Image (cartoon, rainbow, N blue to C red):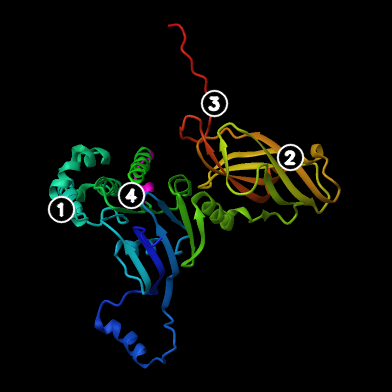
Amino acid sequence: MTGAPIVADGVWKQFRRGRRADTLRELAPSLVRSLFSRGGEQDADAFWALRDVSFTVAPGEVLGIIGPNGAGKSTALSILSGILWPDRGSIRVTGRIGALIELAAGFHPELTGRENVFLQGAIMGMRRAEIARHFDEIVEFAGFPEFIDTPIKHYSSGMNARLGFSVAAHLDPDVLLVDEVLSVGDRAFQQRAFERLSEVVRRGTPVVVVSHQLERVASLCNRAILLSQGTVAFEGPAAECVAKYIEGVHLNTVAADDGCPVTIQHLELDGGDGVRQLRAGERIALRLRGEVTDQVPDGLALGVRVWSLPGEEIVGAAHQRASVLKLPAAGPFAVDVELSLNVGRGMYRLQGVAWDRALHREWLRGPSLLVSVDSPDGSAGRVWLNPRIERSSP
């Protein structure tokens, strides 16, 4: 898509490990090494933060960039914003960039919040009249109008971040770059920030989002790329990309005590592969497949645990004793689990587990799968109570 407003083509970026040389005396050893090194010799202190990374973002599209720490996510965003320049390959970004990367980077501590709003807008290339037109919206969104004429050196880090986000999100950029800003402020501000980004997207602004908040990436982004050690490990629909990332981190890992007499090899959800889209309260059917490898004690139970995507345990486990399940003395087995997923909107990880009821301990964690849950009224929260609310006589 050569006409896309954001194009990264074969981008490589190299950095050096260790402390930066601030003086000529400190820089001299590396200069000497470079003068006398053989042509094909690699700099032992150099490493590639990005390796041959390519992607495009169309108008109105939201691209998520996810991956572990050190994968190159923020480096990619810094190159898109012009803070860094690629060593190989090319970047093209068309139009005025709004970069929510270092939210308060353009703020001066001795200036007031009001003065810094105009300063930040000017740094973004806005005219004073345009900033003034949006000023009241910016202050209201940040949420502390009574402190707008206070020098920001007296602001908390959260207040700085909220004001920085509000400025960048209200000045109508042609391209928006977002790095972890959905984690600033309290839950109410995070929700307002998410809704504001959704408004920007609806206007057709292309957006690139870097975040560890995988639920937000899956719900906000059309597509996503998974970076691993500076390379693109996967590119595709956002929910599918999130699932690939979680697979690498959690889904196919099995933690077991050496004495566990069973293995859990698969957890299946009726309806196919990938991230299943479910409704809150929906009844689902799961199947655990495994193998009995030793004599099964009466205290063994099998079941399923439910986790939020950030790793909060939602349901301890839905267990049933092995004696009731009548597992075979040896060999493969299958166990069906039915449950109502009475959870709020979000992404969840379902995991097969074996439990030692005698010692009240988890004995084994098996593979997992991901589901995305939507509540009928769009409300958030961790639990769906399926309420019935009716008018009654006073």
Answer above or below: position of 15 versus 77.
Answer: below
| Residue where numbered disc 4 is placed | 205
Identify which residue, 302 or 226, lies in the foreground.
226
Figure label count? 4
| Lower sequence index among marks 2 and 1 | 1
Q: CA distance from mark 2 to mark 4?
A: 46 Å
Q: Is residue 376 left or right of residue 267?
A: left
What SS does tag 3 mark? loop
| Residue where numbered disc 3 is placed | 386
| Lower sequence index among marks 4 and 3 | 4
Q: Are marks 2 and 3 in contact (CB under 8 Å)?
A: no
Q: Is residue 383 magenta?
A: no
Q: Is residue 182 magenta?
A: yes
Please identify, in this view, whether the residue under mark 4 or under mark 3 is nearer the observer: 4
Q: CA distance from mark 4 to mark 1?
A: 34 Å
Quadrant position of residue 26:
bottom left
Amino acid, disc 3: Asn
State which quarter of the image contains the C terminus: top left
Answer above or below: position of 277 versus 246.
Answer: above
Amino acid, disc 4: Thr
Q: Is any part of residue 267 visible from this angle?
A: yes
Q: Is any part of residue 114 visible from this angle?
A: no
| Residue where numbered disc 1 is placed | 110
Amino acid, disc 1: Glu
Give coordinates of residue 106: x percent, y percent: 22, 56
Identify which residue, 383 or 2, lies in the foreground.
2
Q: CA distance from mark 2 to mark 1?
A: 64 Å
Q: CA distance from mark 3 to mark 1?
A: 52 Å
Residue span colored magenta: 181-187
| Lower sequence index among marks 2 and 4 | 4
